[in-house]
Amino acid sequence: MIQAERLLKLPPYLFEEIDRRIQKAREEGIDVISFGIGDPDLPTPAHIVNACIEAAKKPENHRYPSSKGTQGFREAVAGRIKSDYGVELDPGSEVTSLIGSKEGVHNIHMAFVNPGDVVLYPNPGYPVYQISPGFCGGRAVPMPLSEENGFLPDLSKIPSDVAKKARIIWLNYPNNPTTATAEKSFYSEAMDFAVENDIILCSDEAYSAIAFDGYKPPSLIEIDGVMEHGIVFNSLSKTYNMTGWRIGYAVGCSDVVSGLVKLKGNVDSGAPQFIQDAGAVALNSSQECVAENIRVYAERRDTLVKGLRSLGFDVEAPKATFYLWMKIPSGDSMDFATNLLKTGVVVTPGVGFGEYGEGYVRFALTQPVERINEALERMESVV
């Protein structure tokens, strides 16, 4: 069977390739310690699991859900935004549920990008930003993220003719993979750029709740103009260890939200209602479980940073996310990751996030401290 051209043009998905390498190593008898995929190893908090069990018993939750999401979940999202950022949202027109934020990140292109339109995306960055525009005939144009510029895109270097053809611009802070953070002044600059060029400003904030040492990342939702030109995507996956539950949300400009909901209404039936009920409990309840996650990740971060520095690597302790972004001393990132895999240690090569990620590797803090120390011992033999 001959696949559609859009599939034939797709590169191998980065994390599927990492999974394949891990599986091959295990088949060869290697004990794998994986820092590759950003999938929390911590369990979903018990009160959320229990809420799901109770919600699943209700017959009304056994029927088709709405693509837009239940009223209770959308109200919980609005409540969390009000609590965290002091911004009032209308749950009816400015909030929608998502089947995980990845679904929304893809479908926003399907809802708003026409053939020939430009989508500006950060490079290095989450691969979906680059891949999805091609499904609707759009052209993905990279915005290089460099260490010299704090891994923020230099909007002044985007050619005016490209900006005028742009339909969407993507931001992602706290950033995956670089762990960089952005302040309100940058969000305001980006909003001015979006308004000037009539672009939808999309902010992926999946790691907004994971920050260390008292730092609180700002959100695009706080910036003037967001309700006319912006939309924020977020997920319960990383905040509450719910990657497998597939539940997220988008908030912002009602016209953009309604366009996304219209698209979703034609291609999905929404997240299961019992999962939305559990998600509402997560958002409405005490956030102490999130604080406990952060304490765990902080200990892991400090252990890994100290160990890598002792091996001679130049690595900074991130202010947010559960990743480390490390510059490698020489050679290419794929070779570096391949050599580490010989010891059973898996990291993600920076080039997998785009050409501007070359020269770096990413560690996910998804291993306990004992395994981190064991990985560091193995790395010493390679280094």
Image (tube, rainbow, N blue to C red):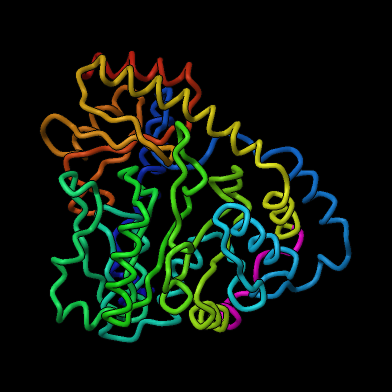
Task: Residue 291: name its quadrant.
Answer: top right
Which residue is at the front of the view, 126 or 13?
Answer: 126
Q: Residue furthest left?
A: 330
Quarter placement of the C terminus = top left
- Whether residue 2 is visible to the viewer of this picture, yes or no, is no
Question: In the displayed structure, would residue 229 be above or below residue 13?
Answer: below
Query: Which residues are the magenta region?
Result: 264-274
Task: Residue 336: name its quadrant.
Answer: top left
Q: 157 left or right of 221?
A: left
Question: In the displayed structure, would residue 243 be above or below residue 317?
Answer: below
Question: In the displayed structure, would residue 354 be above or below residue 107?
Answer: above
Q: 75 left or right of 334?
A: right
In the rendered image, residue 192, in percent from the top left (x then y), is placed at 30, 72
In the rendered image, residue 191, in percent from the top left (x then y), is placed at 34, 70
In the rendered image, residue 7, in percent from the top left (x then y), is placed at 34, 70
Q: 208 left or right of 132?
A: right
Q: 141 left or right of 274?
A: left
In the rendered image, residue 361, in percent from the top left (x then y), is placed at 26, 37
- Whether residue 345 is visible to the viewer of this picture, yes or no, is yes
Q: Residue at x 30, y 58 (%)?
A: 186
Which residue is at the front of the view, 320 or 56?
Answer: 320
Q: Residue at x 58, y 83 (%)?
A: 266
Task: Residue 189: name its quadrant.
Answer: bottom left
